[in-house]
Amino acid sequence: MGITRDNPYSTAYDYYGDPSKLAEYRLFVLNECSMDCKGCFYTKNKNDFNNFDGALNLAKDLVSNGYRMETCYLLPTDMFDNTDNYKLFNNKSFKDIIGLFNFVGIATTLEHGYDEKFFDILYDLYPQHTVEIQVNLSIKRLFDINYQGLIRNNITKLKAQYGERVVINLAINIGFKIADEELAVLKDMMMELSEDGIIELNFTFLYNDDISFDNKKKMLKQSMSTLTYFKDQYKSHNSYTQEFNKRSLLTKPSFVFAHDDIYCNPIVPFDEYVYVKDDVFKLEGSTYDDFITCYCNASVINSIIDKTCETCENLEYCMAKYYFAIAKKFDLGCFMNKF
Ligand code: SF4
């Protein structure tokens, strides 16, 4: 189905503008973290991407080609756990990059509250920006008597202090079996506390070079069952009756900046960006042309995975999100299957 204002999916336009003309950045620039969230395989130091001139050049190129820069995520550790992270805002090119976006995305557990200094720095530099806060939920503390109250209180405080200038989303790490009772609590928290009504799924294991490809493959398959669980929850609790909601139309390029490299992420529907450290998703340089070349190269392996895809109503989405490329590399099959 084409994406037009006349079809039932037109809300995507109302909400995001042209969904194919958005872009997001994921800058791996934060270090040190004392939290020990279950299932976190991020490297907590040596997140040393610093080619901010290159990242700025790419962002400017995207803008001049009609893209809107939506969210710049600062990753991978808890923003408030190391105040040295704020020194990034001393770098001119870094500041200019952030200035091109509408949202700054950060992750935090909120278990130790939050630091007003971060918001002071940010809002002082960018009075119009909104901060997307992904609250990383601790699966191992879900049944701790104080845990949910602590998170709820800190979210309430954040909203009272910053109002519409912060958007609260919830996130969990995946790649391992999550028990039914844990999923049920996560679902309840999501419905109560997530402003987008979703839970972000972090594929942290894909970023860890010490995990073998075979183990990544197993963990990604395991992740698909968590993804399927939440996909079914979105269907039942949000106002969209279709299998897909407005987020599912987004095919926005999501660029990962890690060490010296820039990668473009393919997507598992709904909207889960999957980092694949493979040359086919790596940009040769930091220009719009490098991005287009990367997409063209990835298209070669982004062909249907099964005869049934040819007549499937989701074909366009799977193709546009480069899902087939992920499915082939990790031997996943159709994402609609029960995993
Ligand atoms: S992977 Fe599944 S959902 Fe996607 S086009 Fe093929 S059959 Fe349809």
Image: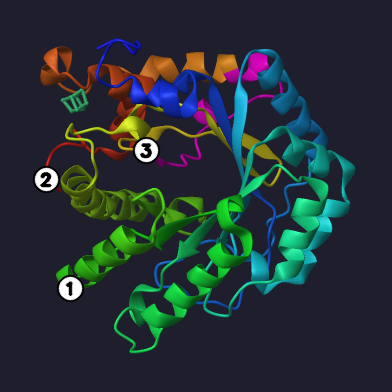
Front-most of residues 13 and 108: 13
Label 1 vs label 2, nearer the camera: 1
**Which quarter of the figure is the N terminus placed in?**
top left
Q: Is residue 279 magenta?
A: yes
- How packed is label 2: few (under 14 Cα within 10 Å), some, or many (20 or more)? few
Q: Dot 3: what SS?
A: loop
Q: Quadrant of residue 22?
A: top right
Q: Quadrant of residue 310?
A: top left
From this view, report whether residue 132 is shown above or below residue 300: below
Q: Amino acid at mark 3?
A: Asp
User: From where the camera sits, is residue 152 visible?
Assistant: yes
Q: Is residue 46 left or right of residue 320?
A: right
User: From where the camera sits, is residue 177 visible?
Assistant: no
Q: Number of labelled discs? A: 3
- According to the picture, the residue beneath numbered tag 3 turns out to be 271
Residue at image coords 68%, 59%: 30
- According to the picture, the residue beneath numbered tag 1 turns out to be 181
Q: Is residue 258 magenta?
A: no
Residue at image coords 50%, 35%: 278
User: Counting residues from the N terminus, which is met first, the one under dot 3 or under dot 2?
Assistant: 3
Q: Are marks 3 and 2 in contact (CB under 8 Å)?
A: no
Image position, residue 317 (x, y; %): 30, 22
Q: Dot 1: what SS?
A: helix
From this view, report whether residue 238 is shown above or below residue 2: below
- According to the picture, the residue beneath numbered tag 2 turns out to be 338
Front-most of residues 7 and 82: 7
Front-most of residues 232 and 323: 232
Question: What's drawn in magenta, residue-wise?
Answer: 271-291
Q: Amino acid at mark 2?
A: Lys
Q: Are marks 1 and 2 in contact (CB under 8 Å)?
A: no
- How packed is label 1: few (under 14 Cα within 10 Å), some, or many (20 or more)? few
Image position, residue 135 (x, y; %): 48, 63
